[in-house]
Amino acid sequence: MQTIVEARGLVKTYRRNDGTEVQAVKGVDLDIQKGEIFSLLGPNGAGKTTTISMISGLIKPTSGDALIGGYSITKQPLEAKRLIGVIPQEIALYPTLSARANLEFFGKMYGLFGKELAARVDEVLDFIDLTDRQKDRVDTFSGGMKRRVNIGVGLLHRPQLVYMDEPTVGIDPQNRRRILDTVFRLRDEYDMTVLYTTHLMEEAQELSDRVGIIDHGDVIAMGTQAELTKQVGEEDRIIISLGEEQIEEANLEPIRQLTNVQSVRHEVIRLDALPIVENDDEAVVDKRGTGSMLAVRSGQTTETIITITALGGRKVLSQIITALNGIPIQSVEVREPDLEAVFLNLTGRALRD
Amino acid sequence: MNKVIHVALNDLTISFREKGIWMNLVVIPVLLILLIGFVNGQTVGGGTTQILMDVVNLDVGEDGEPSALADGFLQTIRQTSERIVLCPMDNDADDICALDDATTLSEAAQTERLSAGTVRGTLIIPAGFEAAVLSGSAVDVIYRSDVDPLQPDFLVQNVQVAVQRVGAASVAARVGADAFSTLSDGDAEAFGAAVYTQAEANWAALAETIAFRVNDEDESSSDNIGFRQSVPGMGSMYVMFTVLAGAVLLLQERKQWTLQRLITMPVSRAQVLGGKMTARFAMGMIQYAVAFTFGAMLGVNFGDQIIPLLLLMMSFVLCMTAITFLLGTFIETEMQASGLVTFFVLITAPLGGAWWPLEIVPPFMQTLALLTPIGWAMRGFGELLFYGGGLTDILLPVAVLLGASAVIFALAITRFKYE
Ligand SMILES: Nc1ncnc2c1ncn2[C@@H]1O[C@H](COP(=O)(O)OP(=O)(O)OP(=O)(O)O)[C@@H](O)[C@H]1O
Ligand SMILES: [Mg+2]
């Protein structure tokens, strides 16, 4: 395996207007292998965009450096930038120009001209499925279409390496599906390496060959999904929703007594406001619980969630339900160790917070 | 280099896609050129109307003949516009001056004629005018009119122009005399007179070539003294608006991340910035082209000093481009940007002489004008379009504008934020 991005000790300190300093990124090391999809997973404000901005040459690191295909992004920026296609989190397009005019202009900035430029623009328009709308102004496009043009611009020069910064933010499920499929096509059909940032565990899980988890400006874990989930052990999480039903702490005691059960906690979530944390330990597992979408629809205002960690979750499930001794259950979900659990384990917080 | 041009072309395309661009680039400037042109040349309403001005020349020698300098002065006034009729000396067979055969005018008669509206203005050249000018001491030429003194007045302008010219010629005489003050009194005086004559002759030659003279062939354009003010004035003011609007565009580009996206591409920061500056510069020159083309359509004769005119325009546009990018380094919202731009333009344009000729404002205002870029630009345009100056006459304004541009660009480039 060949390393295409090798970042060492990246630090970015911003100075606010009031003079105070914010360390947005605190010493990030990254290794991205050629041909893989690498996800940088972290909550809002974790430092994903700042990291991408440093390794794409947009902002100068306060310290540290990154080699892109062997070129230092700080010392040989032009050579390094030629290898990268950056797809920013924002829709970085000229709204009054047509899709084609945007692609043509940015293509020229990548050094494409004449017939080659026209051919690449046609190719990209076909790839993002906007050939028939190419003459229309971007500001007449839907959010999903703009996202696709935004992606297309970064692919014009057939980069070896593509950075996609939260490309699915704010779009409908159908367009999101399309974009996720695009990421696979970039790797499988075009042999590109993709660095993908997201705050959504599901996306990282579906896409990534390897994942880096970033929080408060630090990469706190990096590896394949199997490697990461191994860190949290073999425990499954069993999430039981009781709907509006309340439960006494004493009623959970029989569950705690079960062999294989590691921990039990419960919380009541206000569905019409922010969640109330009933237990004093750590935090809410999943704000929206399991059945909450159903609950919201049925006009329910609170939801009681019991979260149990146990080895071999499915096997103890029937014992747990028996132990609840007739308390009505709205839904049950068994989750195998996942990135969410890894994040929870490392930070004590849920990703969605 | 190629990429610089493409960045510039892209910016120009985007500028021309902006809502209201034709309004701001063409319609309003053209209307203002017309309006301000008519205001500045107001006394010259339609076609071939003559403007009467009473003149009492008290600077006569013992032989009763007017002094040479007073004569030159009146001649200068005549040359500023052929519509001006000096009474009584220029009265014609039809008694255009309505003098009823009188050949001289008393002061009382003058006052009466002025208040009756027979004449537009009254000029009194005091006794000892020539002697005072030649010796370099102060002398007042009295001009009276029924027009609000704060209003730019066609006649005032022409008298002012004449005063300036005579002033310039006599200054030359004085300098000559000063340098030779070691000579005996009589010699110095003779020498001074000689230098004056020379300066006068030079100036007379100049007068032949100045664009200022009314276009003889085209009657309809004979009131273009007003447009000669409003075309460069309103043109320069709109150059400011058009170029400085770029500060808002920069803000938008940063907000919509296209600027950041450009920086992640294999383009250097210098190329990006260079392209954007080129585009702003081009917009400014296009704005001048609009104003001067319209001026030419109105029949204004801008003279044959094309190179100095272009040089002056380019220096001013460059200075505005620099200011645009300086604004781009610290402005944070579009409101702030358009507020500052409007404030800056509306303060400096009248101060700098874009609305009316600076010759009619008090000296301290004329000094204030030199603190504004547009003041220097208008000074240059005045040299070229009113006084028939050439390249050497605009070198100072051009140097000041270019110097300011260099300083402002240096500040802007070092402070410019791309993210
Ligand atoms: N220009 C800036 N000036 C000051 N602080 C900044 C600046 N840009 C980012 N930050 C701060 O740095 C931190 C990291 O921001 P960054 O945009 O990298 O996060 P992110 O992981 O991309 O978040 P999101 O998922 O919301 O896009 C945040 O706390 C943010 O407020
Ligand atoms: Mg971000």
Image (cartoon, coloured by chain):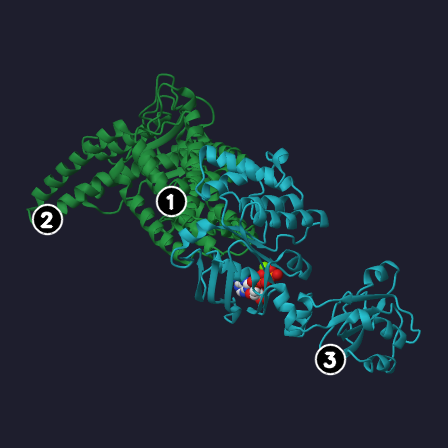
Chain colours: A cyan, B green
Q: Nearer the viewer, residue B357 or B327?
A: B327
Element under label 1?
Answer: helix
Q: Nearer the viewer, residue A132 or B100?
A: A132
Quarter holding residue B291:
top left
Q: CA distance from mark 2 to mark 3?
A: 102 Å
Q: CA distance from mark 1 to mark 2?
A: 46 Å
The residue at the point 71 percent across, 77 percent down is A282
| Whole-percent x, y for residue A145 in the image | 64, 43
Task: State the residue lying farthest toward the top.
Answer: B93
**Residue under pointer 3:** A281
Question: With respect to residue A38, does B65 lie above or below?
Answer: above
- Mark carried by residue B181: 2
Quadrant of the rendered image holding ligand 2: bottom right
Image quadrant in which the N terminus of chain B is located: top left
Q: The residue marked by circle 2 belongs to what chain?
A: B
Q: CA distance from mark 1 to mark 3?
A: 65 Å
Element under label 3?
Answer: loop
Front position among marks 2 and 3 = 3
**Residue under pointer 1:** B318
Q: The residue marked by circle 1 belongs to what chain?
A: B
Q: The residue marked by circle 3 belongs to what chain?
A: A
| Whole-percent x, y for residue B341 in the image | 49, 49
Callout 2–callout 3 Cβ contact below 8 Å: no
